[in-house]
Amino acid sequence: MQPPPHPTSQLTTYELRDYRRELEHALKTLPDHATVRAQLQARLAEVLAEQESRSQAAKMPHLP
């Protein structure tokens, strides 16, 4: 699995969604003892944090 072409914070919403799906799929197919699982879980945590950050920013009231 290739990392995205840009840092997580610079991915579009769609790229972020697709990357999350790829990571989740990869984690489902890997055995529990695979050493790469920790790296993929860390990447997934980063993606989830970015999505949460964007969600919170979207909920903030905009000043006129």
Image: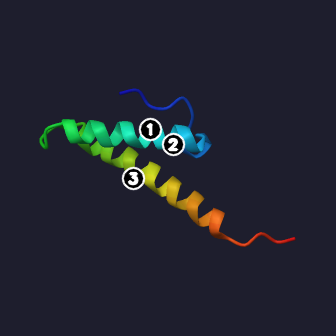
Q: Which residue is mark 1?
A: 19
Residue at point 44%, 31% (across, down): 3
Give the structural element (helix, strand or loop) at label 1: helix
* First along the sequence among labels 3 and 2: 2
Q: Position of residue 2 (x, y in %)?
A: 41, 27
Query: Residue 50, labelled with which disc?
Result: none
In the rendered structure, are the residues bearing label 1 and label 2 in contact, judged by CB atoms less than 8 Å apart? yes
Q: Amino acid at mark 1?
A: Tyr
Q: Nearer the viewer, residue 11 or 17?
A: 17
- Residue type for callout 2: Leu
Q: Residue at x 51, y 42 (%)?
A: 16
Q: Residue at x 26, y 45 (%)?
A: 38
Left or right? Give the position of 29 relative to 12: left
- Check disc 2 and report the residue beneath it: 16
- Mark 3 — residue? 45
Q: Label 1 near label 3: C-beta < 8 Å?
A: no
Say which quarter of the image contains residue 20.
Answer: top left
Say which quadrant the N terminus sits in.
Answer: top left
Q: Residues within 10 Å of mark 2 (few under 14, many from 20)?
A: some
- Of badges 3 and 2, the one in the foreground is 2
Q: Quadrant of residue 60?
A: bottom right
Amino acid type at mark 3: Ala
Mark closer to the chain start, 3 or 1: 1
**What's the distance in space between the residues labelled 3 and 1, CA to CA?**
12 Å
